[in-house]
Amino acid sequence: MAISKKVNGFMENSSWIRKMFEEGIRLKKEFGEENVFDLSLGNPVIEPPQKVQDALVQAAKDTSPGLHRYMPNAGFQDVREAISKTLSEECKVTLSANDLVMVCGAAGGLNITLKTLLDSGDEVLIFAPYFVEYLFYADNHGGKVVSVKTHDDFTLNFDALKNALNEKTKAVIINSPNNPTGVVYSREELKQLAKILKKHSDKSGRPVYLISDDPYKKITFDGVEAANILELYENSIYITSHSKDIALAGERIGFVAVHPKCEDADNLMAGLIFSNRVLGFVNAPALIQRVLKNVQGVTVNVEQYRKKRDFLYGELVRIGYEVVKPQGAFYFFPKSPIKDEVEFVNKLAEKKVLVVPGRGFGCPGYFRISYCLPDSVIEGSIPGFESAFQAYL
């Protein structure tokens, strides 16, 4: 075999999103694109806001010397200053440019963070259901992922968390608003989480870092607050991207922010900058960094996602699905009407509706629906959802 056994095994056992996407391609060729409703990928169809488009044009037209050369591995100083000012106002913690590293999307941010933190065998706790790439990111850097169950409504289960914490725990990753559930962890939940981690850190004499992976933080509904962990826990690392909040997924841009009172903060920042270089990112893309400086506070029209959520939630409940109403992001995570959600997902595929089995997110018995799609795709999927559900009554 040309490739490693590990990578081959990862590809075979965990590519549910990709498998469903490829099945969608096959079905579209056979039945026509207009007759297949692919809700498997979280690839937003909403275009970047006009202010972002204008900033892109302005940045591209700037012919000042040196704008496309290498810069410090942490990114442009003036860009980090602009972001740190905005973030300081949001989280009520005074941050400077020296507390931030510009990265190639949240995925790049997570990888440089885990490379900096982990020794071989260190454990990273994640709450299920989770974004499946966390498993691979931790493995990339010698870490071991420990999955922690949530409650039936996908809120944090602190008893399960306490049972999972041990002397090997190095970090906890949270994702709120959550992919795949759309749940937003409340301020009170995050306060309790911080309290537990501080108590464990004090007792063990070793800090547990709380990593918040938050690319959906600006996409919340009904006035729900997505609190920032930098406000609540000193040993915190905040990671975000602009793939979702200003619809720049393909541009691969985001940042990592470290709480200035984080234990060994200076060394941690140095490690992040070093890892940004040696993992091959070198620096975040220069052009899009300069765009960000001029679009602080800009967000996509979240109302468009709310309308899609409300329509789909109403239809799923009418049909009879058990589903937690999302508070943010653009996913549903309904319970399968039968125990084997893969069988049910295959039944939906027969109806030309593509979704992702919950076991791909560490939570069998459920499935993920993405609704960051044209209304015609969402509306067209409803007969398939209803027919598949009726087949198991």
Image (tube, rainbow, N blue to C red):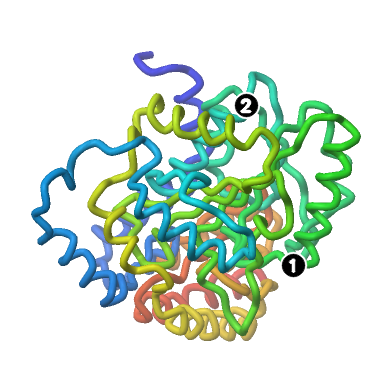
Please identify the quadrant where the C terminus is shown: bottom right
Q: Residue at 72% across / 36% down in the picture?
A: 146
Label 1 crowd bin: few (<14), some (14–19), many (20+), radius 10 Å:
some
The picture places residue 26, in percent across and down from the top left corner, at 30, 53
> Disc 2 designates what residue?
118
Q: Residue at 76% across / 35% down in the picture?
A: 207
Q: Is residue 47 left or right of residue 212?
A: left
Q: Height in image: 298 above or below 126?
A: below
Does dot 2 land on a helix, a strand or a loop?
loop
> Disc 1 designates what residue?
187
Quick one: 345 or 95, which is closer to the camera?
95
Query: Which amino acid does the dot numbered 1 rest on?
Result: Arg
Query: Which amino acid does the dot numbered 2 rest on?
Result: Leu
Q: Is residue 216 left or right of residue 128?
A: left
The mark found on residue 286 in the picture is none
The picture places residue 137, in percent across and down from the top left corner, at 53, 35
Real-space Cα separation, disc 1 to disc 2, in angstroms? 28 Å
Count of marks overlaid on the render: 2
The reply to whether residue 334 is in sight is no
Which of the two discs, 1 and 2, labels the residue nearer the N terminus? Answer: 2
Please identify the quadrant where the N terminus is shown: top left
Q: Residue at 64% across / 19% down in the picture?
A: 120
The reply to whether residue 11 is in sight is yes
